[in-house]
Amino acid sequence: MLPSAALEVNDAATGDAQGVYRARIGGTTRTASSFEGDAMTREERQKLIEQYKDGYNEVTRSLEGFPKESLTAHPIAGKWSACEIVQHLADSEGYSAIRLRRLLTEDRPAIHAYDEAAWATQLAYNERDLAPALDSFRGARGTTAQILERMTDEDWQREGTHPEHGRYGAEDWLRIYAAHAHNHASQIRRLREALAAVAK
């Protein structure tokens, strides 16, 4: 597994398709579930852990200077607003934290999917204050980072099953969520660029 391989979210109409993450390696695209047998070295894992730990800071950096009055705007048709992205991060990161804990404490747990678009709409993502969502995101990352740093080689081989992708291991989890916040930070930056283009 190349340590520099970047996982990316597959943009859907509202934000990202639940559970559809891809890594591009040597010009090929692979889903997170197709990494069976590609065990990481300790150095590769540590690099991704450091990226995971930086995720909250990367998102807050992407929000610096973002016009407050435009946080709920949709300058890119069919895509989430900055507010919706942050609310998604709060929920998704909390959900992902539970996924990791289940992988570590249960025997081959079923890793459940959920409907991100439905959550965004029915939980009023675009109508809620960002501050509690950012606090929740930071807390989920902080407590989970503590667990990641304590995991043994045996822990990293634990796995469960995902309804869409089949085998879902602890290393698959790390590959996905090390990139998750950074991908959304990039989305926020694209929104800001789109807003600037409209203002010209």
Image (cartoon, helix red, strand yellow):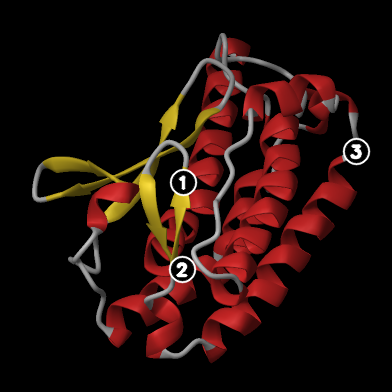
User: Disc 2 to disc 3, how far (Cα)?
Assistant: 27 Å
N-term mark: 2 or 3: 2
- Which amino acid lies under the numbered mark 3 shown in the image of this protein? Asp
- Which amino acid lies under the numbered mark 2 shown in the image of this protein? Gln
Q: Which of marks 2 and 1 is in front?
A: 1
Q: Count neighbours of disc 3 (C-alpha within 10 A) and say few if under 14, some if 14 to 19, many if 20 or more.
A: few
Residue at mark 2:
51
User: Disc 2 to disc 1, how far (Cα)?
Assistant: 24 Å
Label 3 sits on a secondary structure element that is loop
Residue at mark 3:
129
N-term mark: 2 or 1: 2
Picture quarter with the C terminus: top right
Residue 72 in the image, given as x and y percentages of width and height: 77, 23
Where 155 falls versus 164 (above or below)? below
- Which amino acid lies under the numbered mark 1 shown in the image of this protein? His
Residue 21 in the image, given as x and y percentages of width and height: 39, 41
